[in-house]
């Protein structure tokens, strides 16, 4: 189906410096992409979900491991998955995943036809927000598709620094394949496993102000640390893949998490079940 939005004047294209950082280091940062006002709209929706003021499917909400394991009593969410599908009569997250300010550079990397994979909102509260171990997103996505790169866009809703649990990356690690990932001991965020052999001394903290976006290759080793501060550290993460990507097991694409159309064309025989609008999902689904 031809859904290409032509003519595409891509005002926010990749700069030569960003291209070389992408190639060499596997990531780059773009500043002042979104305004505080724009981010506040998303933050308010997500905060409302986190404190139970807005409904959201339970199976898309992941508990903070300390709360889950009964170690503390608090508002215990750490992430909301697929928030672009949110059932609470809002399409702001979906609009954000399609915003050319976010996707124009992705087109330069993956081509004009884009699908969205998970859109994950990380809600890292003061003092109890936990970090994530070294990992490569590709290790997780490999279960779904065969084709190379996906691009993660990590949009800072709050200023992110070492104290409140910013992102760390190992520059250049995207060039050396996908490592084995193993289970971790202790109160970890349930789904995350640790990339073997990744060393803290090779990592660099990517401290960014609110409004900035970190673009990173799905093979880049990255982690984040606990939030030791009195401030929130929230981020909206959207993953993109080419619509020409070959799926590992098309029949097994999670029906509750279909890929989302972002821009350009889709291709029959690739991901057929592409979601185009907000899904109305009930708590009982
Ligand atoms: O935002 C964070 O704290 C970590 C996010 C992350 O590692 C991921 O989504 O893969």
Image (cartoon, rainbow, N blue to C red):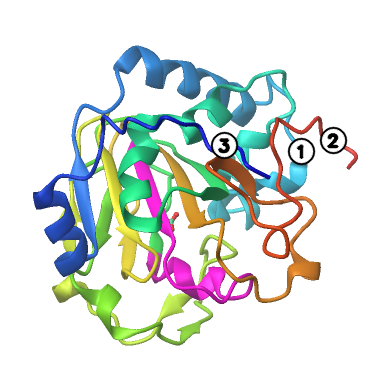
Cβ–Cβ under 8 Å for marks 3 and 2: no
Q: Position of residue 93 (x, y in %)?
A: 54, 29
User: For residue 119, which quarter of the picture?
Assistant: top right
Q: What is the crowding at mark 2: few (fewer than 14 residues within 10 Å), some, or many (at least 20)? A: few
**Side (left or right) of 222 relative to 32:** right
On residue 283, the disc is: 2
User: Which of 260 and 202 lies nearest the eye of the viewer?
Assistant: 260
First in sequence: mark 1 or mark 3? 1
Q: Position of residue 100 (x, y in %)?
A: 38, 31
- Report the span colored magenta: 133-156
Cβ–Cβ under 8 Å for marks 2 and 1: yes
Q: Is 154 contained in the magenta span?
A: yes
Circle 1 or circle 3, nearest the eye:
1
Q: What is the crowding at mark 1: few (fewer than 14 residues within 10 Å), some, or many (at least 20)? A: many
Residue depicted at x 47% and y 29%: 96
Q: Is residue 228 visible?
A: no
First in sequence: mark 3 or mark 2? 3
Q: Position of residue 276 (x, y in %)?
A: 69, 36
Circle 3 or circle 2, nearest the eye:
2
Q: Secondary structure at mark 1?
A: loop
- Outermost right residue: 284
**Side (left or right) of 87 relative to 183:** right
Answer yes or no: disc 1 within 8 Å of ligand 1: no
Rounded to the nearest angstrom, the CA distance separating label 3 from label 2 is: 22 Å
Q: What count of labels does the image hold?
A: 3
Residue depicted at x 39% and y 40%: 103
Rounded to the nearest angstrom, the CA distance separating label 1 from label 3 is: 20 Å
């Amino acid at each position: 189906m031809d859904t290409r939005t032509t003519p595409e004047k891509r005002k926010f294209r990749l700069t030569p410096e960003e291209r070389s950082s992408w190639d060499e280091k596997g990531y780059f940062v773009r500043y002042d992409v979104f305004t505080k006002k724009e981010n506040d709209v998303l933050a308010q929706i997500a905060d409302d979900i986190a404190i139970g003021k807005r409904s959201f499917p339970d199976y898309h909400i992941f508990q903070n491991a300390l709360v889950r394991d009964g170690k503390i009593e608090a508002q215990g969410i750490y992430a909301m998955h697929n928030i672009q599908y949110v059932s609470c009569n809002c399409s702001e997250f979906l609009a954000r995943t399609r915003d050319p300010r976010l996707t124009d550079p992705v087109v330069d990397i993956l081509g004009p036809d884009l699908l969205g994979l998970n859109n994950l909102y990380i809600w890292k509260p003061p003092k109890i927000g936990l970090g994530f171990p070294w990992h490569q997103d590709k290790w997780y996505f490999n279960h779904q598709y065969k084709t190379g790169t996906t691009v993660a866009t990590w949009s800072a809703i709050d200023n992110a620094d070492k104290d409140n649990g910013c992102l760390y990356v190992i520059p250049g690690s995207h060039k050396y394949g996908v490592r084995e990932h193993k289970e971790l001991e202790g109160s970890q965020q349930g789904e995350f496993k640790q990339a073997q052999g990744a060393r803290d001394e090779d990592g660099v903290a990517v401290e960014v102000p609110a409004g900035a976006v970190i673009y990173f290759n799905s093979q880049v080793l990255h982690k984040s640390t606990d939030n030791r501060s009195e401030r929130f550290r929230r981020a909206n993460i959207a993953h993109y893949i080419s619509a020409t990507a070959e799926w590992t097991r098309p029949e097994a694409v999670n029906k509750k998490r279909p890929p989302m159309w972002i821009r350009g064309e889709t291709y029959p025989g690739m991901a057929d079940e592409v979601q185009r609008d907000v899904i109305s999902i009930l708590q009982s689904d």
